[in-house]
Image (spheres, grey):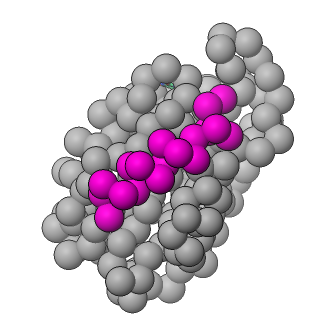
Amino acid sequence: MKQLIVYFSRVGENSVNGQIEVIEKGYTEILAEKIQKITGAEMWKLEPEEPYPFNYQECVKRANSEGWVKYFNKIESLDEYDVIFLGFPNWYRSYPRIVATFIKDHNFFGKVIVPFCTNEEGAMGFAESELKSSAKGAIVKTGFACRGYDAEKSDEALKAWLGKVL
Ligand SMILES: Cc1cc2nc3c(=O)[nH]c(=O)nc-3n(C[C@H](O)[C@H](O)[C@H](O)COP(=O)(O)O)c2cc1C
């Protein structure tokens, strides 16, 4: 069973507990690396061709109005993978449009998608239901969601969740 972790995560100013803070390592990236350590899966970071602004308000403005997002394409094909861990921050109660674009661009038929997400307070929002309707033919497992600032201390919770979903 070949596994791949695909994730998007942003550094720069972010709202943490309602305060603007500079994040040097994205919270979702912290989860992705922990999942990588536990599972040994390959890992691929989704990088937008046009980076998101460092400034939080500017990022919010762009995220609020963007459609499909161009990203650097490093994966030739998902064919060889059976399980895709898909990681993202909760943006507007679902996954960011760069993740939506990645889903649109690939064929998930017969694959297992295991979502994971960090957020400020809204857990996974409606990301799981959006995933189920966009990734046609995929089996979408129950995802893992935690607050961004809890990502660093999520090892035990991640292990327990992985034990259930895999
Ligand atoms: C554009 C934007 C929209 C966001 N929308 C939400 C939201 O609807 N609900 C929520 O709980 N958090 C929201 N957040 C907070 C992020 O989900 C949270 O900070 C996350 O942990 C960031 O992950 P990252 O460091 O991997 O990018 C938003 C953040 C940004 C930048």
Q: Is 156 inside the magenta-drawn segment?
A: yes
Can residue 52 be seen here?
no
Identify the image quadrant of residue 49: bottom right
Locate the C terminus by quadrant.
Answer: bottom left
Q: Nearer the viewer, residue 36 or 17?
A: 36
Residues drawn in magenta: 149-166
Q: Residue at x 51, y 69 (%)?
A: 39
Query: Number of marks in the image?
Result: 0
User: Where residue 137 sits: x, y (%)?
Assistant: 16, 67
In the rendered view, would you say 16 is above or below 128? above
Q: Residue at x 55, y 23 (%)?
A: 120
- Quarter where residue 24 is shown: top right
Q: Position of residue 76 (x, y in %)?
A: 50, 85
Q: Residue at x 66, y 29 (%)?
A: 149
- Work out whether 135 lies above or below 149: below
- Front residue of 120/36: it is 36
Q: Nearer the viewer, residue 90 or 39?
A: 39
Whether residue 153 is visible, yes or no, is yes
Residue 51 inside the magenta-drawn segment: no
Q: Is residue 28 above or below residue 147?
A: below
